[in-house]
Amino acid sequence: MKKTFKLIDLDCANCAAKMEDAIKKIDGVTNATVSFMTQKMTIEADDGKFDDIVKQAVKVCKKVEPDCEIVLK
């Protein structure tokens, strides 16, 4: 499964790169991109674990950028 999420208040490209690296390390993630320019995060991961993976991704993103909000729809 592949989904794209909108990011609010992502402050810098360096933070986006750190978030992307952290998400890629989550078990079950096949690919992830975090774009500072478009303020979007795309996660590609196992269908069965997707919801858990998204929750973990939100946690690691908050560690890197506490002010950044991920819009989960």
Image: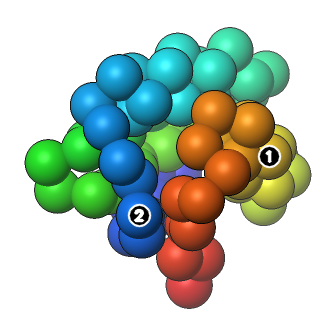
Q: How is the image coloured?
A: rainbow
What numbered label is drawn on residue 59?
Answer: 1
Q: Secondary structure at mark 1?
A: helix
Amino acid type assigned to the residue bearing label 2 in the image: Asp
Picture residue at 49% right of the left edge, 40% below the top:
44
* Quarter-of-image position of residue 25: top right
In the picture, measured across the screen, residue 44 lies left or right of residue 27, that is left
Coordinates of residue 19 in the picture (x, y in percent): 53, 30
Residue farthest left in this picture: 37
Picture quarter with the C terminus: bottom right
**SS class, disc 2:** loop
Residue found 59% across the figure and 59% down from its top: 67
* The image quarter in which residue 65 lies: top right
Mark 2 or mark 1: whose residue is earlier in sequence: 2
Between residue 52 and residue 1, name the one nearer to us: 52
On residue 9, which mark appears? Answer: 2
Q: Label 2: few (<14), some or many (≥20) within 10 Å?
A: few
Mark 2 and mark 1 in contact? Answer it, CB < 8 Å: no
**Point 67% across, 51% down: residue:** 66
Residue 54 percent coordinates (x, y): 71, 53
Please tell me how crowded label 1 is: few (under 14), some (14-19), or many (20+) other residues with Cα within 10 Å: some
Amino acid type, label 1: Lys
Q: Nearer the viewer, residue 64 or 48?
A: 64
In the image, 47: left or right of 67? right
Whether residue 26 appears in this view of the structure is yes
Q: CA distance from mark 2 to mark 1?
A: 16 Å
Residue 56 shown left or right of residue 18 in the figure: right
